[in-house]
Image (spheres, grey):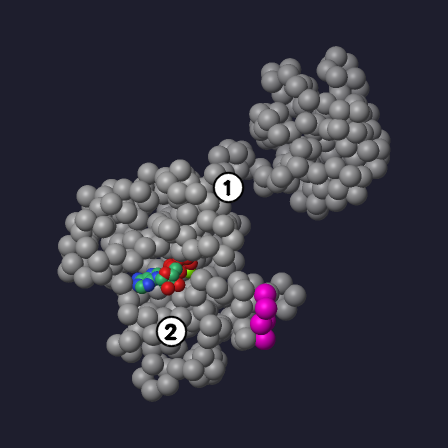
Amino acid sequence: MKIHEYQAKELLQAAGAAIPEGIVVDSPAAAVEAFDQLGGNPVVLKCQIHAGGRGKGYFKGYQEKPKPGEKTKLGGVKYLTNRDEVAQVAEIMLKYPLVTLQTTEEGQKVSKLLVQAAADIEREIYVGMVLDRAAGMPVLMACAEGGVDIEEVAAHSPEKILKNFVAPETGLHPFQARKVAFQLGFTGDQVAKAEKILMALSHVFLDKDCSLAEINPLVVTKQGDVLALDAKMDFDENALFRHPDIQAMRDLSEENPIEIRASKANLNFIQLDGNIGCLVNGAGLAMGTMDIIKYHGGEPANFLDVGGGVTPEGASEAFRILMGDPKVKAILVNIFGGIAKCDLIAEALVKAGKEVGFKVPVVVRLQGTNVDKGRQILKESGLNVLTADGLTEAAQKVVAAAKGQ
Ligand code: ADP
Ligand code: MG
């Protein structure tokens, strides 16, 4: 689960990091008021959406898509010096969807702006923590060349990214933080300021079960301050039950409506780009099903794990979700009846099929407990289901069906 920049900064601040002053607003009038409250000094107006790359984004409908290499006329982060500009720019930002490299082509509607005191930037640094799955522990990454071009640095000069593993039991050690601060070129009293931010980043990452926590840029100002200017966080949803404070930060308007609906039904659902809907019980089987669909030349429309102990209600809701997606041209139901019995799943499918109708071909592969009873139920339902015994046969049938063969 992702949160907004202003929320991520609140967490960092609570853990001891220095951040610039800022006020969150939802209208141009409130933006002007915030500008006044911040002393009438230069501010940066920042669109609060869950996607990054806002600075280089553009507003769809307000301006043409910038050509490669062309500078955007107005991005989702804008430096402004007077009230009139603040009012005008806030109006545009709250009216047109913002398109960035991390949003869809349609862009994301902006409902909140962060009015932030502008910093006099001397240099921009990148620091971030992620889980290194190969090493099996969190890793702190840092780069002296931070800012909006970090992806290019990572792609062309990966050796410039410093990596330090962080033991989850202890968190980042102060000596590690100091070493990184020196490596990033901090000197004098800035070393301690940088260390404090690095320690805060590690604390938030571990205490809140983040899968990603990033400060880009961490800046040094001309006055010698060290500040977290931008922050991005992603949380492990399986650990959210431990963090009501983080759950309260959820902004559903930023999330895919189908995925929200699926999560309410306790389904693990991720939308993909293909046209074959998958309904599978168990994450491993779901991965295997996607692989075999691709192996036979098809493209999955989603990852969907209805869970090992799938209920008839869960299965019907999953089916309705897949049938409701206009991109889905065929559906593969692949169920291994263990805790959930095949006959129960078959009944749920028949019920859902009768309710919503089979608008696209449905291939069903059932195996496991009560499989014969399950197949019988499907056969007697009168519904037009294609059955398959093995996974290969099922994949071949569904790929052909999606192609209209
Ligand atoms: P994004 O990463 O989504 O593009 P950032 O918050 O990192 O958004 O902003 C992009 C760039 O805008 C930063 O690298 C920095 O140069 C500048 N910027 C952002 N906030 C401020 C600020 N408060 N003062 C001055 N410049 C800023
Ligand atoms: Mg940034």
Disc 1 element: loop
Determine the residue positioned at 74% across, 34% down: 334
Disc 2 element: strand
- Report if residue 1 is visible in the image: no
Q: Position of residue 38 (x, y in %)?
A: 18, 59
Residue 157: within the magenta? yes
Determine the residue positioned at 70% across, 38% down: 299
The total of numbered circles placed on residues is 2
Is the CB of the residue bearing disc 1 within 8 angstroms of ligand 1? no
Q: Nearer the viewer, residue 339 or 73?
A: 73
- Looking at the image, is mark 1 or mark 2 earlier in the sequence? 1
Determine the residue positioned at 28% across, 67% down: 119
Determine the residue positioned at 27% across, 63% down: 118
The quarter in which the C terminus is drawn is: top right
Residue 250: within the magenta? no
Q: CA–CA distance between discs 1 and 2? A: 32 Å
Q: Which mark is residue 105?
A: 1
Q: Is residue 227 left or right of residue 307?
A: left
Which amino acid type is shown beneath numbered disc 1? Glu
Which residue lies most toward the bottom here?
A: 188
Q: Quadrant of residue 214?
A: bottom left
Pointer 2 residue: 123
Callout 2 environment at 10 Å: few (<14), some (14 to 19), or many (20+)? Answer: some
Callout 1 environment at 10 Å: few (<14), some (14 to 19), or many (20+)? Answer: few
Q: Quadrant of residue 157?
A: bottom right
Q: Is residue 398 left or right of residue 164?
A: right
Which amino acid type is shown beneath numbered disc 2? Arg
Q: Which residues are magenta?
A: 155-159
Q: Position of residue 295 (x, y in %)?
A: 79, 43
Q: Position of residue 123 (x, y in %)?
A: 38, 73
Q: Nearer the viewer, residue 187 or 379?
A: 187
Main structural element of the magenta stretch: helix, strand or loop? helix
